[in-house]
Image (spheres, rainbow, N blue to C red):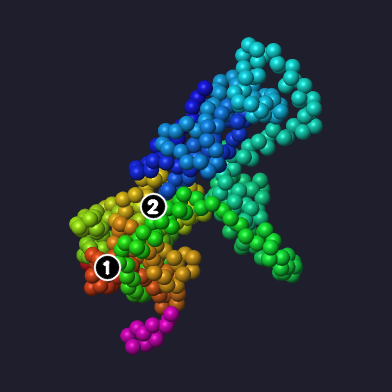
Amino acid sequence: MIEIRVPTLGESVTEATIGRWFKKPGESVKVDEPLVELETDKVTIEVPAPAGGVLSAVAVHDGETVAVGALLGEITEGAVGAAADKSAPTSTRRPDQKTGTGKPIGAGPGEQRAPVPERQPAAAAAKPAAPAKKAEPAIAPSVRRLGAESGIDVATIEGTGKDGRVTKGDMLAEIERAAAEPMPIAQPAAALQLRAPSPPDDATCEERVRMTRLRQTIARRLKDAQNTAAMLTTFNEVDMSTVMALRNQYRDLFEKKHGIKLGFMGFFVRACVQALREIPAVNSEIDGTDIVYKNYYHIGVAVGSERGLVVPVVRDCQDKTLAEIEKEVVDMGRRARDGELKIEEMQGGTFTISNGGVYGSLMSTPILNAPQSGILGMHKVQDRPVVVDGKIEARPMMYLALTYDHRIVDGRDAVTFLVRVKECLEDPARLVLDL
């Protein structure tokens, strides 16, 4: 028997909740095939099979809480798995009836029962494709949920994951593609007919879903930040003309040399590092009665994923080039949406940037990512009339919002910080000249 145990989940994470078992007792498993999904306070982890064979026992079930190192289940390895693959579906389900030990398929006495599975192929010969569909339970719950919400059949999507599995990224790309297709003219009328009012007591009017551990943690941390910090938000606006012109001028050359598109986030990260050096209070935190000033700049970039908001951290930004920052931001954003981030990649940030502009937000007041003392909110770039040299011109403008902890950051420092960010973005040469 091979034991399946809860792996190390990361610093300060001692327990997890069983999200979903992908396999049932008695079903065949392959090495490294996902067996069970664990939900922690910060990420969701898939536990792979340590060996091939048959899942003989499950020690904990969906929704139960387990500690690091706890027993999840057992696998009967070796010939058991091979026999289970060759036998009929009914024979692989036999272990479910009692203990899930897979006894009938073992050596010795197990071979005496060989005639039983031999009768099954004759009855099941008309349906040879049925066993192949057993791979369906390996689809991640998040992918199933997206399929149910969007109405897109997961089976019609070509997966890019391991063994051809459909990932969340594949599902989101398919949803975006479907949304971009023109809607048939007759569709609105049909949709109106489907929205006929249902009786008030109809059970389908409401749906109760248990919050994931990640969502519970997000809710708790945000409320703790409101209750603890003296949060205040100051605003400014930045003319994005120069940055946008710079992107257009060097876009192709940048992508050819670095293999990645030139975005806005690299400029904002570099501008924030420049401003944090001048205003160290915004890069600090309170520890009891002490203020801890950070002389390094680990910038967290908030990413909205299907499971909730996560903040991967780009470390030592003061030592990275703009291209290196862009690569890390894009890579972490992709892995955040696919649920592949490690816990340690979301710890240790000193300042956070949140970009609500990608969703169309024109202005907002971001909440601090405790115990940090500052968070910058980016917003939508929109052409607005501004006065330039006494003339009214249309310029691509963006509102900036800095939420800060007024216990250690004074209003003057907060306003100065935001002005420095604005100056660096409107004149990127400052980033090169360290001004």
Q: Where is residue 274 in the image (x, y as percent from the top left)?
A: 26, 63
Is 392 included in the stretch rendered in magenta? yes
Residue at left offset 45%, top offset 67%: 357
- Secondary structure that dominates the magenta span: strand
Is 387 included in the stretch rendered in magenta? yes
Q: Where is residue 232 in the image (x, y as percent from the top left)?
A: 32, 70
The reply to whether discs 1 and 2 touch (Cβ–Cβ < 8 Å) is: no
Which amino acid type is shown beneath numbered disc 2?
A: Pro
Which amino acid type is shown beneath numbered disc 1?
A: His
Query: As displayed, is residue 97 above or below residue 386?
Result: above
Q: Mark 1 points at which residue?
A: 406
Query: Which residues, given as a range, are shown in magenta?
Result: 384-394
Residue at left offset 55%, top offset 32%: 58
Q: How far apart are marks 1 and 2 (CA)?
A: 25 Å
| Residue 68 visible, this angle | yes
Query: Which badge, 1 or 2, is on the more N-terminal residue?
Result: 2
Question: Residue 312, labelled with which disc?
Answer: 2
Q: Where is residue 13 in the image (x, y as percent from the top left)?
A: 38, 43
